[in-house]
C-alpha cells in the first residue's frame, strides 16, 4: 500500500544547511548583551554588546555599539566601537566612531569617520610581535 522510494524526485532541490550557507545573526537596536559572542556566519549589530566578538563577517549599523575586542574576516563599521579590531578587510563608514587599534590587511576609512587609535597592517603587526617564546618544561 505505501512504498518508500529510494530515489528522490528529479525536481527536488537540496537546500543548504545554515552552517553551509553561513547563517545571518541580527542583534536588534533594543538588545543589550553582556558577554562574548562567537558566530560562524555573518553578524549584524544594531544593539549594544559589552564583550568580545568573533565572527566571519560583521556589519554594524549606526545604532550599534561594541565595547570589547572584535575579530573577523570582514568588518563594516557604522556605529561606535571601543576596543581593538583585527580583521582582514575593514570598512569604516562616515558615521563610525572608533576608539582602539585596528590590525588589518585592507582598510577603507570614509571622510567624517572619527577614529582614536593606531592602524597597523597585518604583516607589520606579525613582525612587531616577534618570534614565539619557547619555555623549557622540566622532565618528570
Image (cartoon, rainbow, N blue to C red):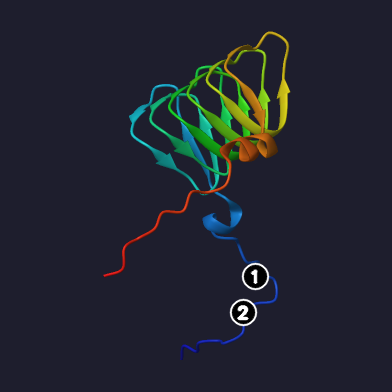
Q: Which residue is mark 2?
A: 8
Describe residue 138's horizontal placement relative to residue 87 as left or right: left
> What is the x, y in percent for residue 73?
62, 41
For the point 73% across and 24% down, which residue is it?
Answer: 108
Judged from this view, the residue extending furthest toward the top is 112
The 10 Å Cα crowd at callout 1, few under 14, some 14 to 19, many 20 or more, is few
Q: Percent from the top left, x then y, of residue 71?
A: 53, 38
Does dot 1 land on a helix, a strand or a loop?
Answer: loop
Nearer to the camera, 111 or 44: 111
Q: Depth check: give the residue in front, 72 or 79.
A: 72
Which residue is drawn at the image coordinates 60% and 54% (left, top)? 21
Residue 128 on image: x %, y %: 61, 35
Q: Is residue 29 above or below residue 131?
A: above
Per the rendering, the mark at residue 12 is 1
Q: Residues within 10 Å of mark 2 (few under 14, many from 20)?
A: few
Rendered residue at 66%/37% (across/down): 122
Q: Quadrant of residue 8?
A: bottom right
Residue 27 x/y as whole percent: 45, 31
Q: Are marks 1 and 2 in contact (CB under 8 Å)?
A: yes
Q: Is residue 49 above or below residue 43?
A: above
Q: Is residue 74 visible?
A: no
> Which of 124 and 76 lies nearest the eye of the viewer?
124
Alpha carbon separation for disc pair 1 and 2: 7 Å
**Residue 124, placed above or below residue 80:** below
Residue 90 shows in the view: yes
Report the front residue among 97 and 40: 97
Q: Residue at x 35, y 29 (%)?
A: 33
Amino acid at each position: 500500500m505505501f512504498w518508500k522510494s529510494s530515489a528522490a524526485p528529479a525536481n527536488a532541490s537540496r537546500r543548504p544547511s545554515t552552517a553551509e550557507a553561513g547563517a545571518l545573526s541580527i542583534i536588534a537596536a533594543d538588545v543589550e548583551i553582556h558577554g562574548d559572542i562567537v558566530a560562524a556566519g555573518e553578524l549584524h549589530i544594531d544593539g549594544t554588546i559589552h564583550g568580545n566578538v568573533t565572527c566571519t563577517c560583521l556589519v554594524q549599523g549606526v545604532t550599534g555599539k561594541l565595547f570589547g575586542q572584535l575579530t573577523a574576516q570582514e568588518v563594516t563599521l557604522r556605529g561606535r566601537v571601543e576596543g581593538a579590531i583585527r580583521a582582514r578587510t575593514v570598512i569604516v563608514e562616515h558615521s563610525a566612531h572608533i576608539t582602539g587599534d585596528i590590525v588589518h590587511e585592507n582598510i577603507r576609512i570614509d571622510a567624517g569617520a572619527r577614529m582614536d587609535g593606531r592602524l597597523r597592517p597585518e604583516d607589520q603587526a606579525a613582525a612587531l610581535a616577534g618570534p614565539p617564546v619557547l619555555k623549557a618544561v622540566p622532565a618528570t
